[in-house]
Image: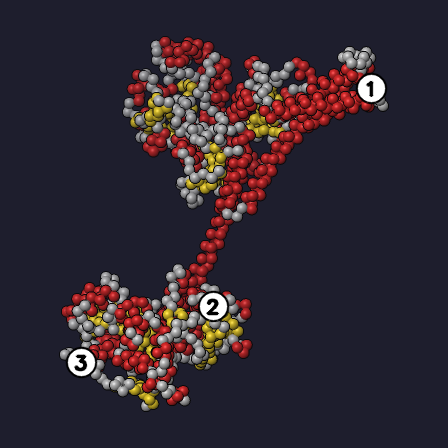
Amino acid sequence: MSDDTTRPEPDALLTEVRKENRGRLKIFLGAAPGVGKTYAMLQAAHERRKEGTDVLAAVVETHGRQETEALLRGLVILPRKRIGYRGRVFTEMDLDALLQRRPTLALMDELAHTNVQGSRHIKRWQDVEEILDAGIDVYTTLNIQHLESLNDIVERIAKVRVRETLPDKVLEMADEIELVDLPPDALIQRLSEGKVYVPEQARRAVHHFFSRGNLTALRELAMRTAAERVDTEMLAYMRAHAVPGPWPTRDRLMVCLDDGAGGQALVRTARRMAERARIPWIAVHVETQADDRLDEDARTRLDDTLRLAQRLGAEVVTLQGGPLVARDLIAYARSRNVTRILVGRERRGAWQRWFVRSVPQGLLRLGRDFEVTVVGTEARATAPRPLRTQEETSRRRTLLGLLWATAAVGAAGAVARVVELFLPLPNLSLVFLTAVLLIAVRFGLWPALYAVGLSLAVYNYFFTAPYLTFSVYHQADILTLMFFVLVAVITGNLAGRVRAQLDAIRQTARRNANLYEFSRKVAAAASLDDVLWAAVHHVSSTLTARSLVLLPPQPRAPDLTIAAGYPPEDRMSDTDWAAADWAWKNERPAGWGTDTLPAAGYLFMPLRTGRGVIGLLGVAFDRPGKALSPEQQRLLGAVADQSAVAIERAQLAGDIEEARLLSETENLRSALLSSISHDLRTPLVSIIGSATTLSEVGERVSPEDRRELVGTVLEEANRLNRFVQNLLDMTRLGYGAMQPRRDWTDLHDVVGRAVQRLRDVLEPFRVSVDIAPETPLLWADPVLMEQVLVNVLDNAAKYSPANGLIVVEAGPRDGALELRVEDDGPGIPPDERELVFDMFYRVKARDSRTAGTGLGLSICRGLIEAHGGTIAAEEGRGQRGAAIVLRLPLVAPPALDAADVEPDPVAAQQPGDEGQ
Amino acid sequence: MTRGETAKILVVDDEAQIRKFLRISLTAHGYEVVEAPRGEDAIRKVATEQPDLMVLDLGLPDIDGQGVIRSVREWSDVPILVLSVRAGEMDKVEALESGANDYVTKPFGVAELIARVRVLLRSRPAAAGSAEATTFETGGLRLDFPGRRVWVGGEEVKLTRKEFDLLRLLARNAGKVLTHDQLLREVWGQAYVKETQYLRVHIGHLRQKLGDDPNAPRFVWTEPGVGYRLIVE
């Protein structure tokens, strides 16, 4: 256990390692403009330059200040890029030129700057991130009010809304923060001397902003931030080096969000709390039936809030909730080891609070073991919700519901009229209740409430005395009516909720079915193309969008190509390609809806697998909104993951097939190698041995022995020659370069030549050749056929006992030539008869005789098949020995001229010949 | 025959080892040897050295062996013996068609080479007179050209006209290879050059009548993919 606690945390170590390869970021932090951040940065840069560092001034805003400009002298300045936007030309930092120039240190003023439209990134800090990734150190400046989590506070202090905000994580990226401090009085002094640059549009606010109180507050903020950083660094160090200490256990903070306007402030508060406590945080939204009725503004607000949370580093979770939101939240909090819960004060009317316990109340009651913080939201957050404009379909359904409710209540009235004859009055309410329940189940809450009202009216008007009026005589009737309304409202509400949950479940089920369908389709897909097609089709139908999959043509290739698209697409605009390239190189989403190249039509998601990013998934919506909702993002993420896994699977299957072929080739190669080393070397050993004997002791050797040695050299050289010939033939067969040059061939010639060539080999055996006289000419390549026979005979000789009989028989049979070569050796076992034609297969040598090369018969098969024939191993006649049987299709030779066949007078009488 | 008894042989091969053993064995058989490693040297030396025979490797580094044959044949009828690898049947036929006189397949034994060389050197000075020779005799085979009669071991053999024409042609070039084209052209005429089945059938008949065993031929030797030759002792 002690091991566990003292082991460095992997995450922390990873961060450390990552930092080693990245450039170092130093931020010059100031409380307000004019404190001298740029000046301090340039001074630091000069010091580095003196040490010999390659410093490049990428962007330095001197705002015409002379001291600052003087400091810029001596530094290399990166020329600005000119970007045309809406008919005007803006200059912007040239990111690509900087990355190409690769200085050791880049100076980039104004970290919070927003880039001109058309730049690669929206914000300068994103440029900085990319530069750091390239291993370049960066010095930059930042005013405290630009920090996103402090945005609200700054606004409250200075009454100025700062638009150019910076995610806090950027500050966290910094390896070093230098606080540039100037007492407020001195700053105000500088301002009055005109030494502080103030943008034109801020002139009005300037005097308010630069008030002493403001500056003091901002200064304190800046100092506190810098001080927190020191804490953070210490903590990071302690974690990375496994210093056992009192730092907090891994607990979590959970912030509960809804569509209220105060959500963003709540998120920022949560972020600050989590940051201070150094704990991860979760932003949770519980989706209830109320969400279905959210208007467009509320939905956007909720999306914005969740996205902000994501950007500030929260894990964003959407839960499917029931009627009791607080219970769902607490259950989730327990499952995630959450210790602190942050929730905004609920905006409810007094009467609402009287009926239903609010979420904060619920949380406080249910989560006694949690630290629950309820944060007050600002006044304008409680502004009345705008009118609910429900979706077209939903409104039509409600209208239909009202009609049905009217009909149902009418019908209930009619039934009640009949029932009234048999039952006492109070029971009639059950009839109306039935109608209300039916409407609630079918059409939801509002039509049900309408039905309640209508029922009440009808009940009162027709069934309570005095009849046909809305007044009531008996107190009992009043009570009946009251209970009726109560029961009707509660049951109607319940039934309506059941309905809503049913809808939600159906929707989830549809989505799951969709995902399942995709898994199934992909599992069935055999090839990569099938998988890709299934993936793009699936993405397209799930998100109602156009989709693309981009893959490198070869694994790990630097460029991408469009591998599949639905609807089929094979080209993209340059902007899209730029976004795709960036996403591919940086392994991060890019394009539409992201912060990188948002002008692109497509959003590109990296397809991640265990092996890394294997490609990109591109999605484009026909009617693009501002960005994807977190829900859509998660769906897209899930789909991208699924696709990635499926594509990887298909690629792996391909790799395995390739590996199998490779190993087969490898086997063949090693067999070839062993065959060559054996069959080439053995004759060479004899040749070299004999030759050296002759050259060294030739004179002392008897003439007989000398002849013997020379004979060995010759014999072995011939053997080598045959082997080399086989190797050559095999190679040519393998390359498909062996084309038979067919000619009319006399089998006698072929067999004769083969026997001639193997004269020496066949010497110890008896060879019998029997070719049927009616054997016609063959339409075959005489040279190749001779090689076949040489190999078969050579093989027969290898396995025959000395003085054994080798029989060659041939004749036409069933329209083919059948040629058998039989020996009386040990024969070939039945289960090996097919194998002997495999390359490098050898029947195990039974005695000390030379085993075959394993090449001969496989070449025979190749050659015979090239002639359209077959070759097989069979049992020898008389149950012993082996028979190699060749069958070649016979082609009728063209007829000879009659005049030529006719014997001429001289040879007319041939019986002399026949008599012999 | 203007020369002394030693014939001069030009050996053309780019392999020094092959030239060496050819030089040694040919010299041992009493020939004078001149060497050329390349095609250009070969052509020049045919002119300057006036050899009685050229042994030419088809695979030369500079000029293709076929090119050497063609350019030498433009002005010289020196016998050319070609060295070629097996499976190079097309090359052999091409070389023979463009004027080479015979070939030996590599790797070869020296005995085979010397036999070819002897045949080529023997036939050369006799070339003028051989057409008039009226008889031919080798290993028990005897031909009477004007009488169109043939004997094997003293027994007369009856041949058809084409069979006799074929045998006569082989005998007049005894020991030398004749390509299918040459045989068909001479015996049947230009129109039959591609009709090899005639050749096969008639050679088959001829062998049968001469009592020649294809597994151990005494008279007609098959050069697969190239042609036939009559064996001389």
Identify which residue is drawn at 55% across, 76% down: A879
Q: Is residue A795 visible?
A: no
Residue position for label 3: B5
Give the x, y percent position of residue A605. 48, 35
Frontmost of labels 2 and 3 is 2
At a point 58% along the width and 29% down the height, the residue shown is: A318
* Amino acid under disc 3: Glu
Q: Chain of mark 2?
A: A
Residue A130, position as x, y percentages in the image: 41, 31
Helix, strand or loop status at disc 2: strand
Q: Amino acid at mark 2?
A: Thr
- The reply, left or right, for residue A703 in relation to residue A324 is left
Q: Which residue is mark 1?
A: A425
**Badge 1 element:** helix
Which marked residue is nearer to the observer: mark 2 or mark 1?
1
Q: In the displayed structure, does residue A840 sit left or right of residue A498?
A: left
- SS for callout 3: loop
Q: Residue at x 38, y 68 (%)?
A: A742
Chain containing the residue with disc 1: A
Whether callout 2 and callout 3 share a subunit is answered: no
